Image (cartoon, grey):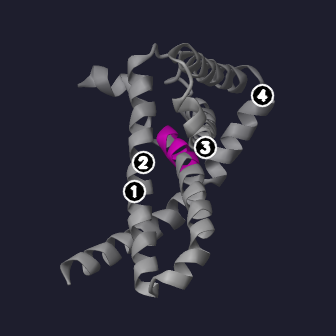
Amino acid sequence: MKWIRERLPAWPGIFPVYSALVFWAYGWYMLMFMFKLPSWMLEVTFGEIVAYFSYGLILVFWDTVQMLAILVGLSFVLPRSWLNDDFSVSGTALAGLLFFWIMFAQFAFVGLVNLPPSQQIAVLVVALLGFILAVLLVRRFPAFRKLAVWFGSSAGIFAYLYGFLTALGVVVVLIRNLS
């Protein structure tokens, strides 16, 4: 048990990474929700819009928990000096880059699916090299490190705000499904 605890990042280092994940994931969801809201206002009731919003918040919460689990799992599997020693800084940088690739994949999905397998592998290799470069930048250059630390600590307010909204979303979904 002690060996497992030593391989996992410390709890204070996990929250800035989760905060960065929350900032990017919920921000992207809010952008997509606001994009669809005007057409929904013309076609569905206010209660249905609140339900859509609530279901979306719950799904985004689940996504952020999964991504955090992946990053913590990587820190467990990879050598300690790669990700675990400075998890809050490296994880925050990886969270930002992860959402860049998620947004890129959403916008270019049709084009990526139609690529030959060799080019799909090339896109994955470029993404992997980007992740490695992000970790190296925040470890080697103090300016990038300060930026990652600042962003991870500043995004904490979003974790609390969206956590509260997600809890309200769970209440709305429970009331809607139990009534």
Q: Position of residue 127 (x, y in %)?
A: 60, 24
Tell me how far mark 1 sits from mark 2, CA to CA: 6 Å
Label 3: which residue? Answer: 103
Disc 1, disc 2: CB below 8 Å? Answer: yes
Give the residue type at disc 4: Pro
Label 2: which residue? Answer: 63
Give the residue type at disc 2: Asp
150 or 98, which is in the foreground?
98
> Circle 4 sits in a helix, a strand or a loop, which is it?
helix
Tell me how far mark 4 sits from mark 1, CA to CA: 35 Å
Numbered mark located on residue 142 in the image: 4
Numbered mark located on residue 59 in the image: 1
Work out whether mark 2 precedes mark 4 in sequence or the reverse, and give the earlier one: 2
Give the residue type at disc 1: Leu
Give the residue type at disc 3: Met
> Circle 2 sits in a helix, a strand or a loop, which is it?
helix
The magenta span reads 13-20
Residue at image position (80%, 32%) is 143
Work out whether mark 4 precedes mark 1 in sequence or the reverse, and give the earlier one: 1
Q: Which dot, 3 or 1, sits closer to the camera?
A: 3
Residue at image position (29%, 20%) is 3
